[in-house]
Structures are given as structure tokens and as C-alpha cells.
Amino acid sequence: MTPTQETAADGPQAPAPARNADAVAALAEAIRTVGSGGSAGPGGKPGTAEGAGAAAPATDAQREQALRDTAEVLAAGGAPAEFATAAVALLGDGAAAALREDPWAVLGLPGVRPDQADGFARGLLGAEAGPGDPRRAQALVPWVLEQAALQGHSAMEIGEVATGLEKLGLPDAAAALQEVVVDGRVMAFQEELPGHRPSDDEEDEPPMRTLLALERLALAEESLADGLVRVMSTFVPGTDDAPAEADDADSADEETEAGEEAGDGDVPVQPGPAAWEAAAVAAPSSSATALVRAVAESAVVLHTGGEAARAEAAAVLTAARGLGLRAWAATWTAEGRDALRGSTDSAEVAVLAELLAGAAGPGRAPDGSLALDLLIVLDAPLLDVELAATLLESLADGTRLVLSGDPGQLWSAGPGRFFADLLAAKAYPAVASRTPDFGPIGELVSAIGIGELQPVEAPDKEVVILTAKDGGEAVHRAVQLLTDSIPRALGIPAEQVVLLTPGHGGTGGTRALNAAAKARLNPGPGRFGGFDPGDRVVHSPAPGVVRLGRVLDGDAAGLHLELTDGSRLTLSPAQAAGLRHGWALTGHQAVGRRWPGVVAVLPEDAAAGLTRQWVYTAFGRAERHLSVVHAAGQALPQAVAERPARPRTTRLRAILAEQAEQY
């Protein structure tokens, strides 16, 4: 859709901010009075027009007709006809009629901005498309919340939502918020203001805040909290006594039938405390011993630590399988899976996404739950709230769950801060590893984790810090390190070195770095949609899902890739449109993986976005060598000392606290 400078907001001026703020405050008080929560409105799916989510056309002919009709409406409003497929997928076979009835429903399509939706509405409605149109308001509120979700927020304070609406030229933000809350397009919640510490003589109610959330995210946080309660409340530790014999044949049959109905006819007898203690004593380290003991006593255990602490999770897997339990571990990436398999000599390790999809792992029991007694999830900070909810829903009652990860690393690409909220809630046993990450890189990263950026002794050039005057010089130096200095001086081939930078754009982003790296390492005309055989690439089919590989060839079937785990993948021309070169990655693209060599590039235009969390994650991706090329000046030490992470607004911690009071 062609952007337009003119918007529907170029009409009457919005009310004074103070007046709007009073109305929003009154709405928040009204929500507090009547309670929180909501349900799906008439449209079923938040943020879509009434009738959205209708079933897809029953036949190919009907679908083709729906696409033609929708393309015609899109063209009439000045939008690209290519949006028709996405519109029909979102709005169903009535997409054409839905868009004519509510042109701002186009805002639900990927990548469409409010100014573009306003232009489309003017194209269909003419002068009737005003800034205060109720349909515009009802589309903008979910859009603002979706944008917040892209920044990691699972909820948003009502005042912040109102401010966002005012910036979009909505005349009466309070009325719009009231409408979407009443009809269920978004859900409203009241919770105690975080960080409030009541005084000894405080008698009034604590200060509260009103949060708004998209239905899918609100329900995800509620669901995963309920799932945690379920596995905890149904957990029954084993005993050292032999199973009691049934009183008679009838009772034995009843127990067998009950087990079969629950899908656990082959569930082994749970080991008792003595067996677990023997396994704990045999664990390879004191931290592993503590973790095994915690797993023996609780259904949900949190485990924190750096890279070396992954060996402790591996020790629990080995111990549990030695006790006869159906135990599996799940990692975020195939690289993490292969590394854990190598350290445990166990095949019972799968990529989490593949385990949940049934492509790997223990399979499903008759009741649909995962057929296991213990699941160890590594890289737990990378789970967003929706994936975490899916994980909890897949576990049978009483299943042991170990969530293991490094709390200093970047959070999930999707909304929420699942692992951090669980740690902050202090509702579950937590075992902190005492196993340090050794060597100069480990020493540097550990110091960063506590807010200190200190020089380290690196006799074998494990850590090298270089400065650059600007992003252009940083790119030049980084590519020189990748292509020449590191392979020549340290014997690490360029294929085992990665460039990491905070963002895609700018003078030192992934685009600039990849262009320079390709020119040096694999120059070519880009004969397959900008790619040549031998190019390093990154494929991201969904947010947070990253596959690394190289181009093999291309033909009429698509682009053929070899992934880093050795598997092959063919991308159709449409799928290949999202492919990017992969010599340089962002910090989020690198999580869950490590490389023998890492070059962290910090251009001057990335200084404002640097956080301790990003620096910790990027520097920690290096196994043998880390080079830091930065033009950020004092922004680097300031970020490490003063900016731990970008804040995220979530509801999970408050939900867990409320549950703790109830149980």
C-alpha cells in the first residue's frame, strides 16, 4: 500500500490532552469498579471486523472468486491487489464485503500502518472517512497493542494506550477504549502498582493500575499460570515402599482401566526419595546434586546459570533416565540439541518446536499429552507467553518440569518475560548454578552480568577490543577480522565466525555487514533472487524462529539450502522472499547458539539501543575468541552499568501472586 502524507486525522483537532487524560482516568476507575476481564466480542477475534475469522471458501472456485472480489475492493481503495490472499486468510470468504463495510479492517493485515489504512478508507468512503469514525477507533486500539507486543509487552497501561491513540489523531481516546473493552476486542485488568511498598500505618487500598491486553495474550498468561498450578497440584512424589497390592481382582482391574483412560498405562513407578538421593550423590558437581534433589521434591523447578550450567541439566536427564523415568530435554536450536546430546550420550534431546509439533521426542499419550514423566527445557528465557502456554498444556498432570536458562540473556522475541516473571514470583524452587564459565570470555561475560565492564587477561587473544571512529570503519574492521585476521592468527576459519550487531539498518547493521562480507567472501551477481551458491543465509519463517545455512543452488522448484544441522531445505520463491544473508546476525537471531569466533560490532547509531542484556548475550556467543569493534564510545560501559534490559509490561507475575494467595 502506498504511504500517504495526508491522514484522516487532518480534520478537527483532538481534545486537549488534559481533558482526554481525565476521561481515561475516569474509565480506569470504572473498570476497577465493575471488575476486569472480558470475552470475545461479536467479531470473535479481537481487532477484526464483525464476521472475521469465517471459514475459508469451501471450494477452489469459491476461493478464487473471493480473491478476485477482494482484490477488486483493495484496488478501489488504492491498495495493492496482492494483499487479497492475506485479507481472505484474515477475514474469510466475505473479505470483500467486510472491507467495504469496515475499511479500517485492512489494518489487521501484516505490515499495514494507520496512515495507509486511513488512505484506503478515504479511497472507499470519500469524505465519510473521518478521524473519529468508530470503525477507525476500534481498529486502532488493537493495532497499538499489537505494536506493543512486537516490543515484548503482553499488556499495556491504559494511559499509554490512550497516548498512542492521541498520537494517531484519534479525537476521543477514552470513548474508543471504553468501546473496545465493552465489546471484548481487548481485555482490561486491575492490578497493584508494581514496586509499591505499603507503610506500616497504611490503611487505604494500595495504588492500582489498569492494564489492557489483546485477548490471545491475556488468555495465554492465564493459561500458563493455570498449567503451572495443575502440574504442581497433581504431582505425587514416589515412595520407597513397594506398591501396595490390590485388595482383589476387581480393584486391580479398576486401577488398570483408570490408567489406560488417562493414557499412562505404561507409566513407570515413580522412584522414591532414597533412589533420588542416590542419584543426587552420584551427580558430577555440587550444583548438579542440588538440582537433582530439587527435581525429586517438586514438579516445577527453575534452574539458572551460564553456559557451563547446561551440564547440570544434562546430569538431571541422565539421573532421571537411570531411575527409569521417561525423561527428555528440549533446546531452542538444533545446535543446542546436538551439543547436549554430545555431553550426555543420550538421544532423548529434541528441539522444543519439533517436540511440541510431534516431529521429534516421545510422542503423545492417548489423552494428547506428551508421553513423558520429566521434561527439561533449556533456553527457557526464550519462551514467549504463547509458546509457554502451549508447553504447559502439553504436559500431563503431575509431570515434572525443569525450566533452565541464563537470566542475563535476551528475553523472547515474542511478548512476555516468562522465565523472568517466574523467578521474580518466587513461587517455585530455584537452583542457581555455582559453576562459573571459565576462561577470559567467561570472566568478561560474568562481570557484565553484574553490571561491570572490566578488562580481562587474555594471553591467547581470547578477547580483543578495537575502537572505530564510525560505523563505516567498524564494518571495515569487522570484515577484516572475519575474512583474514581471525583465520590467520587463531586458526578459526571464517565459516566458524559470526558478526553480531544490534540491528539490521544503519551504518553498521546486518545489511551493511552482510553486503561487505559477501563482497569479500563470495562475490557474485546474486542470480537466485540476490543469492549465489555458497552464500551464508538466515531463514526466519516466524518471529523467534531462526535457521542458519548456506545456499546450494536454485531452480524452478525454488532455492535449495543446506542448514547448519546438515538437513536440506527448499524454499519456494515466495518463501525465499524472507531470506537474508547470514554472515552477520542480530543478537536475537544468535540466541541458543555459539560459535568458535564472534565479532561484536557496535556502531555509533546503535548506542541508544544498547543494554546490558544485549551485550551479555552477544559476547557470550563466543566459545574461543571474541573481538569487539565499537564506535559507541561511552555508550557501551553505560549500557552495561545502567541499562539492564528494555522493560516489558506483563501480567504473569501478578497472576502468580494472586494464585499464591488462593492456594
Image (spheres, helix red, strand yellow):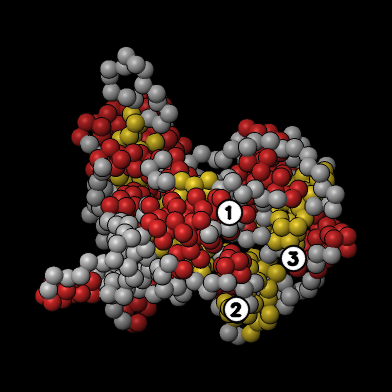
Quick check: 502 left or right of 18? right
The image quadrant of residue 25 is: top left
Q: Which amino acid does the dot numbered 1 rest on?
A: Ser
Name the element at disc 1.
loop
Residue count near mark 2 (Cα–Cα under 10 Å), binned few <14, some 14–19, many ≥20? few
Circle on res. 285: 1
Q: Name the residue that disc number 3 marks.
A: 496
Q: Which amino acid does the dot numbered 2 rest on?
A: Ser
The image quadrant of residue 311 is: bottom right
Q: Is the Cβ of the residue at disc 2 closer than 8 Å to that at disc 3?
A: no
Q: Is residue 85 visible?
A: no
Farthest-out residue, bottom? 556
Name the element at disc 3.
helix
Q: Position of residue 280 (x, y in %)?
A: 49, 56
Q: Nearer the viewer, residue 60 or 634?
A: 634
Q: Is residue 248 visible?
A: yes
Q: Nearer the viewer, residue 435 or 633?
A: 435
Which mark is first along the chain, 1 or 2? 1
Q: How many marks?
A: 3
Q: Name the residue that disc number 2 marks.
A: 567
Q: Position of residue 380 (x, y in %)?
A: 49, 54
